[in-house]
Image (spheres, rainbow, N blue to C red):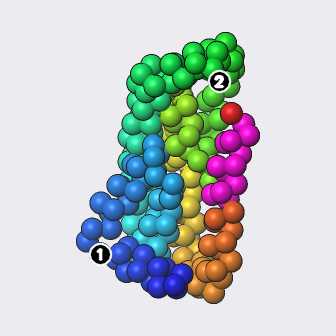
Amino acid sequence: MLRRLYDWTMSLAATRHAERALAAVSFVESSVFPIPPDVLLIPMVLANRRRWVRYALICTIASILGALLGYAIGHFLLETVGRPILAFYNAEDSFQKVTDWYNVWGGWGILFAAVTPFPYKVLTIFSGATGLDLFTFVVVSIVGRGLRFFLVSWLLYHFGEPIRTFIEKHLGLLFTLFMILLIGGFVAVRYMF
């Protein structure tokens, strides 16, 4: 089954709709969707290595726009949903302490989540909820997401076919590692906040 999914993704990466799908996945992954755009980015670059810059740029721009949606979700839903819940549990002071800390150090958290498999969407929403400076949020997101997507794309461009062979040979292991990192990121979020 994993082999069929991989083959299907590779075939999608070569279609005329691939760039739109890449942009859509990059957008929603930054605010609500659990699957990172790498699942499309990697096969797309491998299928057409000359377009690596374009694909990385699509991922970066769509991801930043999605991050702004995540920020808006955190900002607007905090007042309508979050504050009453905090008041019910008498946790307004605790939330304010976390907010104060996050507004000083949150840029580093965004950078960490933007570059690593850590669930970026969690911090985009949390940034809006805590009122992290929007300029800082956008700049750090551009740097982090750009670094991540351009580095992945460049590595695939530069080492293309050997990486493709490696992926195909070790698909099961790579999928397992990916799932461990994805789940580990969500577990880390639970214990950090």
How busy is the neighbourhood of tag 1: few (under 14 within 10 Å), some, or many (20 plus)? Answer: few
Q: Quadrant of residue 68?
A: top left
Q: Which mark is residue 103?
A: none
Most extreme residue toward the left, as rendered? Answer: 16
Q: Main secondary structure of the magenta part?
A: helix
Q: Is 82 placed above or below 63 here?
A: above
Magenta includes 190? yes
Whichever of callouts 2 and 1 sits on the residue coming sooner in the sequence is 1
Q: Which residues fall within the magenta stretch?
A: 181-192
Front of the two marks 2 and 1: 2
Residue 105 image position (x, y, % from top left):
68, 25
Q: Nearer the viewer, residue 8 or 17?
A: 8
Left or right of 104: which side holds 87? left
Q: Does residue 81 lie above or below 177 as drawn?
A: above
Give the labeled residue for mark 2. Answer: 102
Residue nearest the viewer, comparing 166 with 121 = 121
Residue at 67% x, 12% y: name it: 93
Q: Amino acid at mark 2?
A: Tyr
Secondary structure type for disc 2: helix
Q: Amino acid at mark 1?
A: Thr
Relative image position of residue 177 (x, y in whole percent): 69, 68
Q: Which mark is residue 15?
A: 1
Q: Position of residue 89 (x, y in %)?
A: 63, 20
